[in-house]
Image (cartoon, coloured by chain):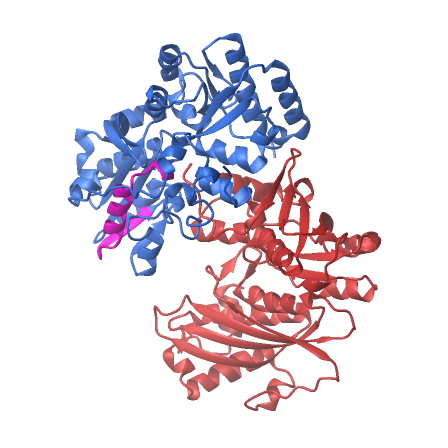
Chain colours: A blue, B red
Amino acid sequence: MKFIDEYRDAEAVKQYVNQINKIVTGNWNIMEVCGGQTHSIVKFGIDELLPKEITLIHGPGCPVCVTPLEQIDKAIELASRENVIFCSFGDMLRVPGSKKDLLSVKAEGGDVRILYSPVDALKIAKENPNKEVVFFAVGFETTAPANAMAVYQAKEQGVKNFSILISHVLVPPAIEAILSSPSNKVQAFLAAGHVCTIMGYEEYYPIAEKYKVPIVVTGFEPVDILQGVYMCVKQLEEGRAEVENQYSRVVSRDGNKYARDIIKKVFTLSNRKWRGIGEINKSGLTLSEDYMEYNAEEKFNLNDIKVDEPKQCVSGKILQGLIKPNQCEAFGTLCTPEHPLGATMVSSEGACAAYYKYRSKEKVN
Amino acid sequence: MNDKDFILSCPIPISDYPNVLMAHGGGGKMMQQLIEKMFFAVFGNEYLAQRTDSVVLNLEKSKIAYTTDSYVVKPLFFPGGDIASLAINGTVNDLAMSGARPLYISLGMIIEEGLPMETLWRIVNSIKEKADKAGVEIVTGDTKVVDKGKGDGIFINTSGIGVIEHDKVISPYEIIEGDLIFINGDIGRHGIAIMAKREGLGFESEIESDCAPLNHVVTDLLNTGIEIHCMRDLTRGGLVSALVELSTASGYEFVIYEKDVPVREDVNGACELLGFDPMFVANEGRFISFIPEKYSDAALSILNKHGEGKIIGRVEKKNNEGVTLASRIGTKRILDMISGEQLPRIC
């Protein structure tokens, strides 16, 4: 398949690995921000091809994993209500809340539906005027335009029985939080290609400059990731800290103007809690004043639901790259995809799930 | 079939009963009418003609294979097949995988009140067509009607009996080191066809289910004298689930060569889009077989006669490694069953 096969080509992979081997002299820690990249790395065994000097650290870019327990519990509360049709991307259904997950709510009779687009939820709202339709608006900058569009259309069309439960987070504040942490080990970033498809990469220049880190916008296929790693290593070896774009077949410096415009119109910056990490200043989005009536938390008065994160799950450390999934005491024993302690074990982009699916189930020290 | 054909051909007076009623399963005249005029009229054969509570079958003295499966697919009709093709081929294929020649099928239908009679008529005719194609007969059956809202249109259960006319043992315990792993065609089409239809995903070209009977290709393999150690059809859970089950049962490590696993471009595209791995997506007309290397040319030529044969892997040493994938880019990783259903990812 075009744009897939050539980026999974064994010969090209070998060439990039050789190139990296040729230029590397120091020990470097590079973080891939996006969970999609983490899965690709573990699935294709890319980290095992790299020289021992390079460590890939798995970042917080999995929207399912960073959605706080509190929001999951709010989703479960809403989905359990008699008059609510609760719509979500499929990935969220298995994520454990403090007592149960959305799949259990569905089994208990809740009307929980898997959708591919939030605009479909709006359609359901129009078809079911006597029901309240709530869409679980989760994600990074990638899903924000579609969620914004659904709310924008709802307002335009005067649909009142539609709202969204928001857990929208942003990549640059997370990168800054990691870089300003005293325990930070990350020396370069593979920025998330799909996020930059929407946002462009202008906003990474100040970060690269302030923290003196190379940031390379990178795609998701093995050749993309190796090329991104090569570009990071080259910068690190040459003492540069610049923003570069490996994923130029998809990403432009300005991103997608129309998508950014609709985000700006409907959403506004807000503080957000990140599961396992805590609250990060201005790290997310919420509906702007004009669209507040579509905010499910306000509409259904859910702001009182406050939940503490469980202590036994170390996903916060995993999401910050402080430990690897298979270094966790519970990995593969207490915590499995069937009985997850945290979201990183169930999301298709979660680092723990990737290690469990593609690697040995044994814990390493 | 269009509406006009249905009205002309359906033996149940359409104007009286456009939909199935509770009474059609109630044991009275209406049920009798449905059985006589629809089921017997379509399936009519010497076994049904016995009109006994249970059919009496005259099997030659031989080993038989016996299996059962239930079919609850939604939607009932999808590109490349329908619930009828699953109900016949699914059971036929389970028999074929034991090296049996499928002969007799039982048909249990649980119909939801209100199912359009036309839909039932289409399904019954489709069952007959698929049974003829597979060379099996419907020899006994049962009909129940459940309240509206208690079923998804129709659920079907079929059991099947097949005869084993050779003395080969075909089972996971026969797998040995050095066996090659064959497949009879591209994977993932059924799951994607159903998904696209169910979720209303409009792909540019329609992906059709691979649903097909496997007994003819298996008979050819057996008749040629090829030593088949084990066979398994790939259904829910896809290729990986079948491989993991057999690796666990046999105790051998299997190595699968990613580049040799056939996936059609449109299926691959749909999977990329949805975040699915085709190796876990359902099939209904695909099977893997474990055959010693010396028969590989003969096996491939038969598989190619019926479809598209391919060697996708090899049985390695007896150890606890399970199934490993030799990836396209030269790395190696484990292949394991997924814990639940594959759910579409967020982005």
B149 is higher (above) or lower (below) than A60: below
Which of the 4 image quarters holds residue B16? bottom left
For residue A141, side relative to residue B288 (left or right): left
Give x and y (percent) for residue A64.
37, 39
A303 is higher (above) or lower (below) than B289: above
Nearer the observer, B104 or B64 = B64
Residue B79 part of the magenta-drawn span = no
For residue B65, side relative to residue A209 (left or right): right
Give x and y (percent) for residue B208.
58, 52
Nearer the observer, A38 or B55 = A38
Give x and y (percent) for residue B203.
51, 43
Nearer the observer, B194 or A236 = A236
For residue B14, side relative to residue A112 (left or right): right
Pick out the residue farthest to the front: A365
User: Could you tell me which quadrant the N terminus of chain B lies in?
Assistant: bottom right
B102 is higher (above) or lower (below) than B28: above
Residue A78 part of the magenta-drawn span = yes
Q: Is residue B275 visible from the viewing direction of this image?
A: no
Which of the 4 image quarters holds residue A169? top left
Task: Write the start and end of the magenta stretch as one range.
Answer: A64-87
Look at 45% across and 11% down and name the residue there: A242
Nearer the observer, B136 or B49 = B136
Which of the 4 image quarters holds residue B346? top left
